[in-house]
Amino acid sequence: MLLVRRLVLVVTLSVLLSSTAYDAGRASDRTDHPVSAHAASARTAAKPAVLEPGDKSRRVRALQARLAQLDWFFGSPTGFYGDLTTEAVRGFQAKRGFPATGKVDRTTLRKLRAMTSAPSQAALVGGNAPGRMDQRCRTGRVVCVDKTSRTLRWVVNGRVQLTVDARFGGVGHATREGTFSIRSKSRDHVSSLYDTSMPFAMFFSGGQAVHYSPDFAAVGYAGASHGCVNVRDRDGVAWLFDRARVGDRVVVYRS
């Protein structure tokens, strides 16, 4: 009888110990649950950007060329990830139901590549083909403006750093030709004569300046300036504005 009681006691203790261990395990599962949720959140967080504002590279140029195929980016590819590129990416992302961050993550890039073809070399350059460079543009820091090819090049010691489309004055408002220098700069200039916006203006001859033109961006060569050198690539002229200095030469010629 005593032996039976001892056996019952041992079995009872074993059951109690097993139940306690099981409850402890369940408590441990509950304690670990927030960590698992955090890990899951980390896995679903937005992926880091592949390309983002401020970048300048051939990959950005290719991005701009692909966006241009879908009519999201206008103007010539510059390779600089500025405001126009950011807005183009935002528009593309919003249209596809992606978070409109303006930064290119891998999901955005995969979708863009699936919808476009690899840009040709001509598409990467974009715009008008630059003509023969004037000898005056081959030394020093020069804003080199070719009225024949309708291009503006930023040249430093003979090396072209930037090429963008350019538009000039119409009848009665010819853009003057010759060698000049940047006399002054005005980032948010508004013409007092015509009451029009002239962002990133770099004045080189009287009231004539190199500047961004929203009208050129909108209608292209269907319009004309009042003598200024219009640029329709906002990112490009903004990039140039930040680098060109008062005193740098401006050469306006025909090739």
Image: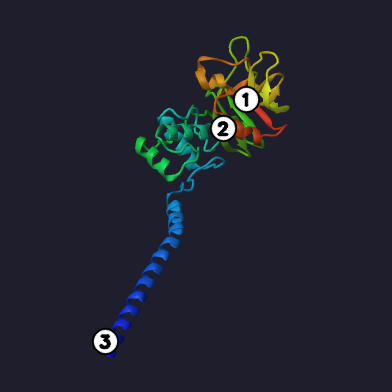
Farthest-out residue, top? 172
The scheme the figure's colours follow is rainbow
Q: Which residue is mark 3?
A: 4
Q: In the image, which is nearer the foreground, mark 2 or mark 1?
A: 2
Instruction: Look at the image and tell me in which quarter the C terminus lies.
Output: top right
Farthest-out residue, bottom? 2
Instruction: Look at the image and tell me in which quarter the N terminus lies.
Output: bottom left
Decide if residue 125 is in sight here.
no
Residue 173, how many percent across, how many down? 63, 12
In the image, what residue type sits under mark 3?
Val
Q: Which residue is mark 1?
A: 211
Query: Is the residue 3 above or below the residue 166 in the image?
Result: below
At x 44%, y 33%, the residue is 94
Q: Residues within 10 Å of mark 3 (few under 14, many from 20)?
A: few
Q: Residues within 10 Å of mark 2 (few under 14, many from 20)?
A: many
- Left/right placement of residue 204 relative to residue 14 reads right
Label located before the other in sequence (3 or 2)? 3
Q: Which residue is mark 2?
A: 235
Residue 30, how many percent across, how many down? 42, 61
